[in-house]
Amino acid sequence: MDKENPKAWLYLLPALIFLGIFMVYPLFDVLVYSVEEGYNSASQTFFGVGMYNYAYVLRDPYFLQALKNTFILVIITVPLSTGLALLISLGLNSITKLKEFFQTVFFLPYVTNTLAVGLVFMILFKKTPYSDGFINLLISFFGGSTVDFIEGPYWAKMFVMCFYTVWVVLPFKILILTSALASVDPVLYKAAKVDGASRMRIFTKITLPMISPMIFYLIITGFIGAFKAYSDEVAIFGTNLNAAGMNTIVGFVYDMLYGDSGGFPSYASAAALILFVIVLTITVINLLVSGKNSRYS
Amino acid sequence: MSVSQFEKIEKKDRVSRRVRTGITYFLLAVWGFIVLFPFYWMILTSVKSYSAYNSEYIPKLYTLSPTMQNYRDAFTAVPLARYFGNTLIFTLITTGVMLAVTVLAAYAFARLKFRGKNLLFTMFLALMMIPNELVIITNFVTITNWNMRNTFIGLILPSVTSVFYIYLLKENFEQVPDELYKAAKVDGTSDLKYLWKVLLPICQPTIVTITILKIIECWNSYVWPRLITDDAAYFLVSNGIQEIRENGFGRENIPAMMAAVVVISIPLIILFLIFHKKIMAGVSRGGTKGS
Amino acid sequence: MKIVLDHVTKIYPGRVKGSPEVRAVSDFNFEIPDGKLIGLLGPSGCGKSTTLNMICGLEAPTSGRVFFGEDDVTDLPPENRGVGMVFQSYALYPHLTVRQNIMFPLENLKGSEKLSKEVMREKAEEAARLVQIDKLLDRKPGELSGGQQQRVAIARALVKRPRVLLLDEPLSNLDARLRLQTREEIRRIQVETGITTVFVTHDQEEAMSISDQIVVMSAGVLQQIGAPQKVYDDPVNLFVAKFLGTPAINVFMGKVRNEMLWIGDEAVLQVKGVEDRNVYAGIRPEGFTLQEDGPLSLKLVRIEVMGRDTSVISTHGACEGTTVRSIVPSDAKINNNGGYVRFALKPYKVHLFDTTTKERIYFGAQEE
């Protein structure tokens, strides 16, 4: 049974075919698309090779808006959601009664259809001629002035976008951090208590270093996920994100590809590759930082 | 230390512990409220009548005259049942094919010997880093060229492989002791039979995990279906709900829309309530956000 | 610092609703004299670790008080008790170096007790020297062997000069050779520092070899306290007799008639002052003497040669266990008489116990 088994290729065949057609080939194809200038999807012709598509995308005001939106979203939601998840996980870990109940409730958003629940958020935040909506009701109850979060000022729309994103990504982070916290050997806490460490010191000197690999993991995946934000925005602002001024980079890619503004796979490819480079750069920076900070065996 | 000093320390310790626990529960309850409130609001709105909802300038937090009319509307005025059926077909077939492809590939990597295995597996792992956004453009063109837009097969084909699940399953297969395979070989069991009769039953928890994760992913998928279908007859629920939002129910009939949202959310919530331990264990082990 | 446990009881509520509560420690009373090394001994699950945790302050007793000297520390958290503890798994902080681990308790000191960096380093190095790991200060725990980790744990427990040092199964994660060496090490450190030390173990040999006193526990109840040899020679009940000693004591069903102990149908020993009754007779393996006309005859199974001694394995109908093991000098002549060997008994190696209460019955010269 140690001999080579050519039948293995038979087992691998379906996976190889699917991956070859839908992952490996597209990977090269997208590069080709991105340098084909003036590609016409109807006639499938192009009249040159070069960097024009990148230059075009980088000058497109919709792309620049999308870039700005995405960066704001990333910078706000990644630290906020990770910190909030850490806080909630610490709380969960310190209680026994109702712990499982809370854990289950907190995980609920993970399994819901974000497109569908986004509509509920839209309704809660929206101000229409018929009604101010629930959130504005709360705001005016506390003496603030009402605002339309869905079609109103930019900061309000950005607020809803960030709020919903945090709501959607938190379950995963809470789950990961709760299990990371639970896997810290409880005897270490006992030892620290005998050693007379204060609660704050136990947290900063023992808990944080012990779960830091998981925190870095969440930050890295959080960055990647937030840079790829799209469907949560559609859920709240509708499919025409450019009109709402709330498009994201991924949204720009799809809009270039398809729909009323679509038909430009070359521009889409260039934008997708720009996104890929950004994500890759940030990930590498993250890995370098985390490698420096969590070196223990 | 004198006795009174001891007592002071004890008392301080007890009081601060109680205060801390109180604050913890309060904050957890606040977040629980934020999580649950949208669900409450969606159910509440879905049972308010159209006229009642629109006459509430200040939205009411309860209703005294619940109605099922919105649910009837959701199934009659828009093809919700069809979206639902489409999603079910898409989810079941995709998950089924994915399982077959994944299990076979993972088995080959975990158990069989062949030339170039390590190199191939390294290349597989490298594929995990490729974001979906990068390849979806070409896939869109490919499926369009194959004239598979607005077909189930076009929806399903690019969604059936997951390098990550192959990796997860391969790791699990490798934990099964070698002796079992040798024993099966001595007994004259074929590779396929060993996979089916021994490996799969032993690795059932992982199989269940990736099945559930894939079902959730399929049920919520939006981007690819949106690109590949523009005929409402092939819409999945996520696209259906966007369609309903933009063109359904005539004037903005929010209660009917919420009824549709409730209907769409229910299958996964039921799945979650039954399997919540399995799902949470699976996600924390398999750790990716399925989107 | 002497430690007093005064009627200490620990009850855990049942795990599931309706399941009975668990009495881990029951009405525990004893006084640990200042500066001694005490071995807390018992089978696993007997409540010895719970007792240690209550001395440490990691758990609060359900009722009863704990005193350090004259101070009632029952409700004090561990950091205010001045205790040092070595955990079974050592509980070293994996991300800190050995030096940082040892300095950790010092860095926690606040207010007037706060130390300068130099003093802390000095104290850490002193503690490291005491346990002979001063060459390893800049390593991480993951790079050390089990024995070295153990020493780091002890150094960390000692660095604050605690009033009481507690060790929970300190040797159980070490291999046999290291265990022997480390227990001598613990004894040396304890003698050098003079700190009152309590250690928990299920290994009776370990406890007997280094303790000033041993405390035998079973099912949450204190069985006997005393110097190791004294407890071994003079167990108060059948449990203690069986728990101490390797090979274990041989227990026979017997009866007393006219101040003679009968095992089977042989009168084997005179037991003055015991009235007629049924008894358990425990005979230590070294309590048998080969004697051609000895009163007790055992059916020989085999002989195990162990070098210095010889083990005679035999059976007897009245024996509780499957075999009787007796140890005789290797130069003794074993007279095999039709498959039987005859023994005389050493009176002070024979202990009688009540068949229902399992309490000791004293006879003749044995004093209470």
Image (tube, grey):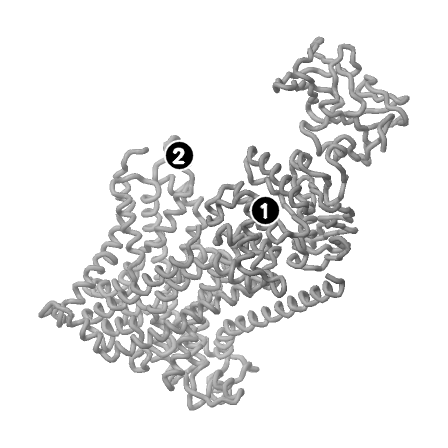
Give the x, y percent position of residue C208. Answer: 69, 35
**Which residue has dot 2 on it?**
B184
* Residue lying farthest to the left in this orientation: A47
In the foreground, C101 or B209: C101
Q: Nearer the viewer, residue A199 or C116?
A: C116
| Residue type marked 2 | Ala
Task: State the image coordinates of residue C59 (x, y, percent, origin top left).
Answer: 67, 55
Q: Residues within 10 Å of mark 1 (few under 14, many from 20)?
A: many
Which residue occupies 45% across, 75% down? B259
Q: Is residue C20 above or below residue C281?
A: below
Determine which quarter of the picture holds residue B89.
bottom left
**Number of numbered markers:** 2
What residue is shown at x 69% (from left), y 28% (from top)? C248
Q: Is residue C160 left or right of residue A245?
A: right
Q: Which mark is residue B288?
A: none
- Circle 1 chain: C
Circle 1 residue: C154
Q: Is residue B73 visible?
A: no
Tell me where residue A226 sits by quadrant.
bottom left
